[in-house]
Amino acid sequence: MQKKVTKIGVMTSGGDSPGMNAAIRAVVRTSIYNGLEVYGIMRGYAGLIDNDIFQMDSRSVANIIQRGGTILKTSRSEDFMTPEGRQVAYDNLKEKGINGLVIIGGDGSFKGAQVFSNEFDIPCIGLPGTIDKDIAGTDKTIGFDTAVNTAVEAIDKIRDTMDAHDRLFIVEVMGRDAGYIALHSGIATGAENIVIPETKTDIEELIASLSEKEKRKKLVNLVVVAEGGEFGDANALDAIIRKRIPNAETRVCILGHIQRGGSPSCEDRLIASHMGYYAVESLILGRYNVMVGVVNNKICYTPLDKAVKEKQKIGLEWMKIVKILAS
Ligand code: F6P
């Protein structure tokens, strides 16, 4: 593997997350501070293959730290999964002399980076940018804090209606394979039940707890379910509940993509800025093919293959606490 990085490419890949712009800004300005050239790659790996690559300067990232989405746009590229696609991507980088990459995205994006860096002599650094918070080697991911606060704000509003009408609400939050948004937003909004993909839910116990509350006229009940829950989506769970508790007046609300957008929270701007800075420093120091993460509030580095293979472990003792607090 070649050693000295002089031209850095930066891209965002996979689902967008609030704070990606702050991370791009940090990568661009830290690169320029260190005398390196920096290039923006549009639409993630797709732009790498299409040669949609442009040189950035300090001004290219002015006035973006507070903006959601990503100025570099993002996508999930099928072509990059093929050796032919990766060869074209490599040729495009070579032609511009780009010899280091920063990829801001989730585990799917890191898988691509890992394969790419194994095949070619391009050092890659991953920054965890996903609202799902489902990547090993970091306590925090760029976007989670904003997304979970968006969910909390929305559920608080729904609670007003729940309370006014004595209703049972089933609120679905994002997280195909990960229950962090459901767990955190559910705890923070006083949910009676939380359904996440990481644990088996005892449906009999869930029905019994809702029936018992109905009997003693605790009619305001909130179930927060991750979209990847074992019973299917929130509508599927609602159908089960309606069948078993016919008297309950239930409503379903699916929060959806509202959770992905919006101005990043202070926390997301901070971790994005911090991680972006250390991504460039890593490339300069020759610490390649790692993901920059935060563990116990300290920056740390995890080999990309480890970040790809494992998921962040969920603190399951919370599920017990939820039951006690919701009684
Ligand atoms: O990975 C982030 C995420 O928002 C998941 O929580 C969700 O399942 C998925 O992306 C939705 O993806 P898309 O925007 O492609 O429908």
Image (cartoon, grey):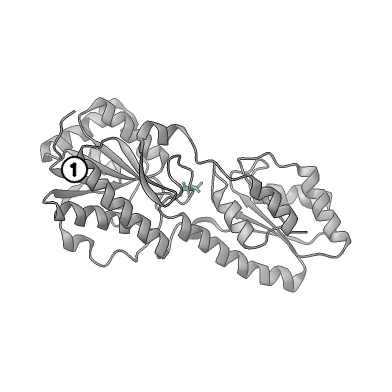
Dot 1: within a 10 Å radius of its alpha carbon, few (fewer than 14), some, or many (20 or more) residues?
some
Report x, y in % for residue 145.
47, 58
Q: Vertically, is 124 above or below 269?
A: above
Assign the C terminus to one quadrant of the image.
bottom right
Q: Quadrant of residue 77?
A: top left
Residue depicted at 56% across the width and 67% down the height: 153
Q: Position of residue 139 (x, y in %)?
A: 46, 48
Q: Relative to 103, is 250 on the left or the right?
A: right
Disc 1 Cβ-to-ligand 1 distance below 8 Å: no
In the displayed structure image, the side of residue 124 where residue 176 appears, left or right: right
Decide if residue 264 is in sight here: no
Residue drawn at x 26%, y 67% is: 63
The residue under the point 63% across, 47% down is 233
Residue 73 pos. (x, y %): 31, 52
Residue 102 visible in the picture:
yes
**Left or right: 312, with 266 as reference point:** right
Amino acid residing under circle 1 = Ile
- Percent across and percent down for residue 317 are 65, 46
Task: Classify mark 1: helix, strand or loop.
Answer: helix
- Count of marks placed on residues: 1
Look at the picture and state if 244 lies above or below 190. Answer: above
Dot 1 corresponds to which residue?
284
Q: Is residue 46 above or below residue 1?
A: below
| Quarter of the image that includes the N terminus | top left
